[in-house]
Image: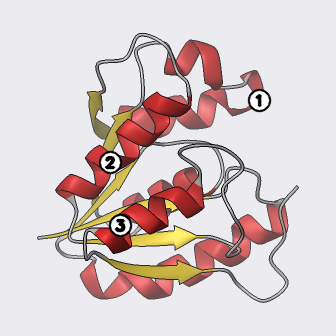
C-alpha cells in the first residue's frame, strides 16, 4: 500500500483544476491497486486529488484541521462536493475547536507523518500565510519525504 499526501493551492481556476486532474491521473495510475490518498480536503488541489484517487479505485483518508471546519470553511457552492468526498473517506479530525492557520499547519504535519510521499499542486511561490503550500512543501522536504510538484503549463490561480 502506498500512502500519498497532497498539498496545494485552494484557488485554482476551473481550467487549471482540469489540467491538474489530468496530471494527477498520470502520476497516480501506477499505484491504482494499492493507493491511499491522504488529504485535508480543502477546496482546490485537495479536492481534485481526492476525486482522482477515488476515480482510480484508491482509498481516501481525510484529516480535518478542526471540529468547525465544515461549518466555518466550506462555502455553500462547495458543500455538496465536500460532503460527497468526505462520505467516501475515513476521517480524522485534529484536536482543534477552531479552524485557523495553526490548525491547518498541524493537520498538514499530521498528513506528513502518515504518508510515504507528497504531491504539491504549487506554483513555486511563497505561502500566503502560516500553513500554506510552500510551508508544507518545506516541512515535507525537511522530513526527507519525496515531493512531486504539479503545476501544468498555462496553470493559473484565481
Q: Earlier in the sequence, mark 3 or mark 2?
A: 2
- 104 above or below 31? above
- In the picture provided, is 77 more to the left or to the right than 47? right
| CA neighbours of label 2 inside 10 A, class few (<14), some (14 to 19), many (20+) | some
Distance, label 3 to label 2, CA atoms, is 8 Å
| Res 142 quadrant in image | bottom left
At x 44%, y 41%, the residue is 105
Mark 1 neighbour class, 10 Å CA radius: few under 14, some 14 to 19, many 20 or more: few
What residue sits right under mark 1 in the picture? 77
Which residue, given by chain and number where applicable, does mark 3 sit on?
140
Q: Residue at x 29, y 57 (%)?
A: 112
Image location (x, y in percent) of residue 99: 52, 21
**Residue at disc 3, secondary structure:** helix
Rounded to the nearest whole Å, what is the CA distance between mark 3 and mark 1? 31 Å
Residue marked by disc 2:
109
Horizontal relation, residue 144 to residue 43: left or right:
left
Q: What whole-number distance in Å separates the C-alpha atoms at marks 1 and 2?
A: 28 Å
- Which sits earlier in the primary sequence, circle 1 or circle 2? 1
In the image, residue 104 sits, relative to residue 142, either above or below, namely above
In percent of width and height, residue 83 lies at 51, 29
Asked if one can make out residue 48 in the rendered structure from this viewpoint, the answer is no
Determine the secondary structure under disc 2: helix
Work out whether mark 3 precedes mark 1 in sequence or the reverse, and give the earlier one.
1
Point out residue 92 in the picture as x, y percentages from the top left corner.
26, 31
Amino acid at each position: 500500500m502506498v500512502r500519498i499526501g497532497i498539498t496545494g493551492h485552494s484557488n485554482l481556476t476551473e481550467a487549471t483544476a482540469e489540467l491538474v486532474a489530468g496530471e494527477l491521473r498520470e502520476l497516480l495510475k501506477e499505484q491504482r491497486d494499492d493507493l491511499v490518498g491522504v488529504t485535508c480536503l480543502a477546496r482546490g488541489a485537495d479536492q481534485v486529488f481526492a476525486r482522482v484517487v477515488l476515480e482510480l479505485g484508491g482509498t481516501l483518508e481525510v484529516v480535518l484541521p478542526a471540529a468547525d471546519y465544515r461549518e466555518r470553511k466550506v462555502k455553500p457552492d462547495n458543500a455538496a462536493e465536500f460532503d460527497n468526498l468526505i462520505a467516501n473517506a475515513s476521517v480524522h479530525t485534529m484536536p482543534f475547536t477552531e479552524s485557523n492557520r495553526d490548525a491547518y499547519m498541524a493537520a498538514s504535519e499530521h498528513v506528513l507523518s502518515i504518508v510515504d510521499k507528497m504531491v504539491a499542486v504549487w506554483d513555486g511561490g511563497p505561502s500566503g500565510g502560516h500553513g500554506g503550500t510552500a510551508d508544507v512543501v518545506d516541512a515535507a522536504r525537511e522530513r526527507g519525504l519525496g515531493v512531486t510538484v504539479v503545476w501544468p503549463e498555462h496553470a493559473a490561480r484565481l
